[in-house]
Amino acid sequence: MSVNQDKKTKLWYYRLSYKKRNGKYSTKNESGFKTKKEAALAESQMAILLNKGNDITASERLFPVHMREWYEIYRKGKNSLDNDRDIDRSVRFAEEHFAGVKMKDLTRSMYQQALNEYAENHSTASVKKRHTYMRACIRDAIEDGIIFKDPTYRAQTKGKIPPKNENLKFLSEFEVKRLTRELLSDLKPRFISRYIILFGLATGARFAEILGMTWDCINFKNRTITINKTWDYQDTKDFGNTKNYWSKRTITIDDQTCKILEQLKKKQTSNIKNLVFVNTKSELVSNNAVNKCLKGLCRKLNMQEMTCHSLRHTHASLLIYRGINIKYVSKRLGHKNIVTTLQTYSHILDEMEQKESRQVDDMMSQIYKSNAK
């Protein structure tokens, strides 16, 4: 082991001799260090890796190649197909923006520049998704001793294109009452979309979670439902995993929704999958069909048009406006953590904060008035 300075460049380098697995000796050189201390530290870290039997040539691999292999081995098929698609998009992002870049040569500035370019034409959510999976891959590489520094450290992921749901669409309580009245006026099993809309309003469940509901997940006695799977209506046309671990949950439902489901069950013929929301022909309905039904009802009632996902936002907003604890709302929606809920419904919480600040002012005014008497 030796650390020396290049007389021409004034930069430091190390030369490390080691024994390979086949018993032969070889050397590992690395240069370009500004100080002797940096070179010595790098030499020490490399010696540790060699003693552990790590493949030191892995740092020479191209980052896109490494990430593609990481996805195929560790992540593909472990969660939903949607999750696979998200990771694959991140891999393709790496293949496009870091072509020819070795693992050891990937720097913070290089990484941030790629995100900046992507952010010019994409939303923050999209930029964050690309960053999330590349960061996961790189942190695994650090854990495996392939690289030592994290080029994703404190990366900025703000996009310049406003997200589609920047102003989340949701109905007011008055509009929900009107819509519910209209849905109940013609509630028949052959119009299963109406049942799905009512269920979405009552539970805030995602569309795939609603389609994946089976009768054994409904406890009529305790008035609860258990969400433990989804229905993959895009690819497999079969049951699938929930969005994440936290999406599996048991929540309460109101008495009227419970009665509506009981009536639906009595009118249904048996279906192979024991699904709740199928029509009289035991057929599932598409997301487009439910959206079409909902938009038609909104037009009829002279309200802004909504999609099925807006029912989830409506359910959440009604709970928040009624002062329901945000932690409970987060668990009911199946969010990974409360931060997701706070970020998604920040505009509603801001309105609530302004309203509550006025209530504090009113409280103090009343205290002052009582002392003035």
Image (cartoon, rainbow, N blue to C red):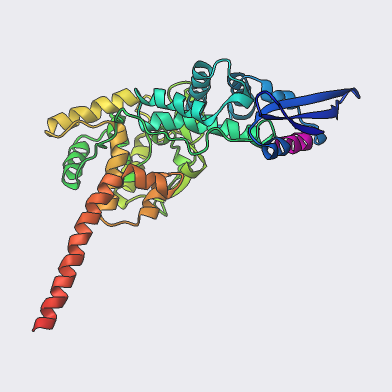
Rendered image quadrant of residue 215? top left
Q: Which residue is farthest right?
A: 23
The residue shown at (47%, 23%) is 237
The residue shown at (66%, 28%) is 10
| Observer-nearest of 59 and 288 | 59
The residue shown at (10%, 77%) is 369
The residue shown at (68%, 25%) is 59
Q: Is residue 109 left or right of residue 304?
A: right
- Helix, strand or loop for the magenta stretch, by majority: helix
Q: Which residues are magenta?
A: 42-49
Question: Split into 4 quadrants, where in the image is the N terminus?
Answer: top right
Give the total number of marks visible in the rendering.
0
Residue 353, image x, y percentages: 25, 55
Above or below — where is 41 with respect to 76?
below
| Observer-nearest of 200 and 139 | 139
Residue 66, image x, y percentages: 63, 22
